[in-house]
Amino acid sequence: MADKKATLKVDGIEEQFELPVYEGTVGPDVVDVRSLSGKGLFTYDPGFMSTAATESKITYIDGAAGVLLHRGYPIEQLAEKSDYLETCYLLLHGELPSAEEKETFVNTIKNHTMVHEQLSHFFNGFRRDAHPMAIMCGVVGALSAFYHDSLDIHDEHHRVVSAHRLIAKMPTLAAMVYKYSIGQPFMFPRNDLSYAENFLHMMFNTPCEEKKISPVLAKAMDRIFLLHADHEQNASTSTVRLAGSTGANPFACIASGIAALWGPAHGGANEAVLNMLEEIGDESNIDKFIAKAKDKEDPFRLMGFGHRVYKNFDPRAKVMKQTCDEVLAELGMEDDPLLKIAMKLEKIATEDEYFVKRGLYPNVDFYSGIILKAIGIPTELFTVIFATGRTPGWIAHWNEMISSDYRIGRPRQLYTGHPKRDYPA
């Protein structure tokens, strides 16, 4: 039942259109324009910046106020009081787990971390210098060839099993991508380690030597996963939903999300931060690059500052800054040249009136890039880490759609090409 109505009058058409207007729990009202197509009219919204393509109960963002809620819980509270796997459970099930439910969920994820041994041979078809995201697209999509017992999207149990498998196996695959690129043997996951500890173990240990995982670094890794777990109807999530609307299996849908995330305008932002720091090169060059950033005629942009959605501040950035400080102190890397450039840029951006006035504050990508570099993760693997963290959000949105009365996605267009014409004689 509509809460309000909007009236649309189009020049040249006598009939006025009454369109239902719906109110969400919070956020802007939405005008239901579905009836217009029956009248020969479409709405025009490039980039879908003013279009709600779905109804969802998972995540809410208020960019102007700097608010990010997962199932109603502020991201700051989840980062402080929760952990990644508990947040995964929240996104998937809608409520925080009881102690018993969490223990069961964590154990289930641990029991799914290994991948089919035959999948390890799949890597041999890739060049060693292939981009990690190219390999991730391939191996995640290939999971559907190994797990035939959970591909019926209309079976709720199958969907749950697929969700558990994807969340559990993503860090294993991410670590395998890294190991393959440097020619080291793959490390099997260990069920005695936490999710983040296990990832760092598979990344940096070898059969020759297994070092103890630093609790500070494990906590930082867990927070990076948590802070990237979901971000509403962004490009990759919308891609997962669009692919899912065709009835594609969940592994293929998540692979499509990984492909969308690969774009530098989406998941490549923290990688771009490190590339920018390397371009600046030295603290003595900072003033020159700040001037370039302020020059409208100069194509140079400060990466990792400001956000397309958050116009005030990124609520994830404050948590990530604290984590960044903890990691740098743990590793004694305060004197690293690139990190010194980053810290000076941070100071300028938070104090310089030009940046403050425009809301160009350091965002989550700025700090996560610094943390990942400090931990020892190569720049080209950053987006793979992002994809690993974002997996529960993708799955939650996919499952929400499949569980509803959904239709195949079919955006319309404003056609400006040739009208019908005859082939020349």
Image (cartoon, rainbow, N blue to C red):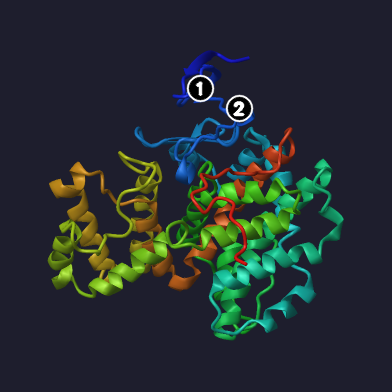
- Residue drawn where x is 59% and y is 86% of the image: 183
Question: Marks 2 and 1, Cα distance to the nearest angstrom?
Answer: 10 Å
Closer-to-camera residue (221/68): 68
Mark 1: few, some, or many residues within 10 Å (few <14, many ≥20)? few
Apparent side of residue 271 relative to residue 385 in the rendered image (left or right): left
Considering every residue shown, the one lying at the far front of the view is: 425
Q: What's under tag 2, amino acid-wise?
A: Lys
x and y, in percent, of residue 310 in the image:
36, 41
x and y, in percent, of residue 284 in the image:
13, 72
Residue 273 seen anywhere in this rendered image of the structure: yes
Q: What's under tag 1, amino acid-wise?
A: Ile
The residue that mark 1 highlights is 13
x and y, in percent, of residue 390 in the image:
56, 52
Residue 202 seen anywhere in this rendered image of the structure: no
Residues at circles 2 and 1 in contact by the CB criterion of under 8 Å? yes
- Residue drawn where x is 24% and y is 64% of the image: 300
